[in-house]
Image (cartoon, rainbow, N blue to C red):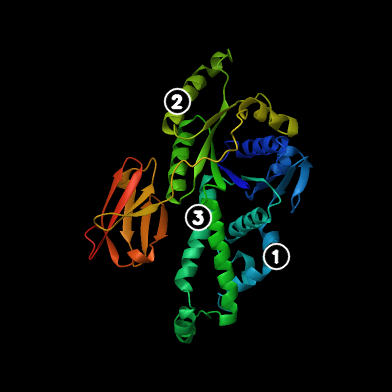
């Protein structure tokens, strides 16, 4: 079965070299592999010291590399879809004239749609993705769900919105809603977004892997990253602690650094005990070229099951109980004092610091209200009952 591995972490932790090492190991195992970069600051070409173009290119047996150019992908692979999206904007508006840059995150969305398209083609057994730093990756991964949510609100099934809102849309909102003919294109986009978000959240198909360093600021960001990944329902099944100094370095200059690294390695081991952890040594040379990257394979990626997908946390779920229904969400490392929760007509909204997720409620719960919520360990439990809400 084909599988996608997405590598992310704080900027400068070595995501690209770790992802590249996995790609090389996969290819050497005889698996047809694609190493793809979605980071706008592409550096796969720099790492392998070869030019990489706008389409997948072979760099060794069983391994292709690809630096996605979102504008090229939008223009050449999804042009019809872009034209459909442009129809949603007022004609002659500056954003409509700008075309492809009309919505924040749109370029990154089409990079993901391209990966989904490649996955569906089935050419590669493993797709390894070198992502941008943490914040950008979170924005990238949650964008399909966010856009789907807005489209669902704007264009409900049955095209009721078009029939009801078309006569007043131009007057009140200065927006020309699409015709019924155009609506089919929007529905196709919605379907693609739905399939994309299901692929990214499918524990049997996609793994998120975090790369970190044994340093305080990086460790704290890694914990937050893991929490937010769980908030948005992604399965993290690997942690890579990079640039570990050798214990026998025998240089007093590094004594304090060794102590710091020991402290945070232990903290990471304790905090992420449920997740497979891999340690990668610090190298006394710049990691450039195929030979240098292969050192990571030899030193750190020696386990046979390193490509096995593991289900670490479950997706949010609804279970019927004596009071009504109970919803549970995994939120590791979340401080309950920083978790806000409220209910709209059709969604549960969970907010942690600057990140917010709207979770659509099943139809059966549209007449239920939240009556209680509590954090127990890493699990947020939300109780739904018939009648008015008692929880604020």
Residue denoted by label 1: 75
Give the mark nearest the N terminus, 1 or 2: 1
Q: Eyeballing the image, is 217 above or below 361?
A: above
Say few, some or many: other residues with alpha carbon within 10 Å of mark 2 (under 14 / 14 to 19 / 20 or more): few
The residue sitting at 49% across, 24% down in the picture is 261
Give the mark nearest the N terminus, 1 or 3: 1
Which mark identifies residue 48? none
Which mark identifies residue 142? 3
SS at badge 1: helix
Q: How far apart are marks 1 and 2 (CA)?
A: 48 Å
> Considering depth in this image, is 257 or 111 the residue closer to the camera?
111
Quarter occupied by the C terminus: bottom left
Q: How far apart are marks 1 and 3 (CA)?
A: 23 Å
Q: Can the viewer see residue 191?
A: yes
Q: What is the residue that sits farthest to the bottom in this orientation?
A: 167
Q: Distance between the residues labelled 2 and 3?
A: 31 Å
The residue sitting at 68% across, 34% down in the picture is 25
Residue 298: x percent and y percent? 67, 26
Residue denoted by label 2: 266
The residue sitting at 78% across, 45% down in the picture is 58
> Considering depth in this image, is 361 or 289 the residue closer to the camera?
361
Residue 268: x percent and y percent? 46, 30
> Considering depth in this image, is 218 or 20 the residue closer to the camera?
20
Give the mark nearest the N terminus, 2 or 3: 3
Say few, some or many: other residues with alpha carbon within 10 Å of mark 1 (under 14 / 14 to 19 / 20 or more): some
The residue sitting at 49% across, 48% down in the picture is 234
Residue 177: x percent and y percent? 52, 79
Residue 175: x percent and y percent? 51, 79
Say few, some or many: other residues with alpha carbon within 10 Å of mark 3 (under 14 / 14 to 19 / 20 or more): some
Please tell me how many numbered marks the rendered image carries: 3
């Amino acid at each position: 079965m084909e599988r996608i591995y997405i590598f992310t972490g704080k900027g400068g932790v070595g995501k690209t070299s770790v992802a590249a090492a996995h790609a090389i190991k996969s290819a050497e195992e005889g698996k047809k592999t694609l190493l793809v970069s979605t980071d706008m600051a592409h550096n796969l070409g720099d790492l392998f010291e070869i030019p990489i173009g706008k389409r997948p290119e072979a760099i060794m047996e069983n391994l292709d590399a690809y630096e996605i150019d979102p504008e090229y992908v939008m223009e050449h692979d999804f042009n019809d879809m872009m034209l459909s999206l442009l129809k949603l904007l007022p004609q002659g508006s500056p954003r409509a004239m700008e075309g492809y840059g009309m919505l924040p995150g749109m370029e990154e969305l089409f990079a993901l749609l391209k990966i989904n398209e490649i996955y569906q083609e089935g050419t590669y057994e493993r797709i390894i993705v070198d992502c941008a730093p943490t914040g950008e990756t979170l924005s990238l991964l949650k964008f399909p769900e966010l856009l789907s949510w807005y489209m669902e609100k704007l264009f409900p099934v049955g095209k009721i919105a078009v029939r009801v809102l078309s006569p007043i849309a131009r007057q009140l909102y200065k927006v020309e809603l699409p015709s019924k003919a155009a609506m089919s294109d929007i529905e196709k986009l919605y379907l693609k977004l739905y399939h994309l978000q299901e692929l990214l959240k499918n524990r049997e198909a996609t793994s998120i892997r975090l790369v970190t360093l044994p340093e305080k600021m990086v460790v704290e960001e890694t914990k937050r990253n893991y929490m937010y990944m769980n908030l948005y329902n992604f399965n993290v099944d690997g942690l890579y602690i990079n640039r570990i100094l050798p214990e026998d370095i025998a240089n007093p200059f590094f004594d304090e650094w060794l102590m710091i690294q020991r402290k945070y390695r232990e903290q990471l081991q304790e905090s992420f005990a449920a997740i497979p952890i891999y340690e990668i040594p610090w190298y006394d040379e710049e990691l450039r070229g195929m030979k240098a990257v292969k050192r990571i394979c030899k030193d750190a990626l020696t386990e046979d099951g390193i490509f096995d997908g593991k289900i670490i946390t479950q997706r949010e779920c609804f279970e019927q109980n004596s009071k009504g229904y109970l919803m549970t969400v995994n939120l590791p490392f979340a401080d309950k004092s920083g978790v806000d929760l409220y209910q709209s007509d059709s969604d549960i909204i969970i907010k942690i610091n600057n990140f917010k997720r709207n979770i659509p409620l099943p139809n059966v719960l549209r007449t239920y209200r939240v009556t209680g919520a509590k954090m127990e360990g890493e699990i947020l439990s939300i109780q739904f009952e018939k009648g008015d809400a008692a929880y604020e």
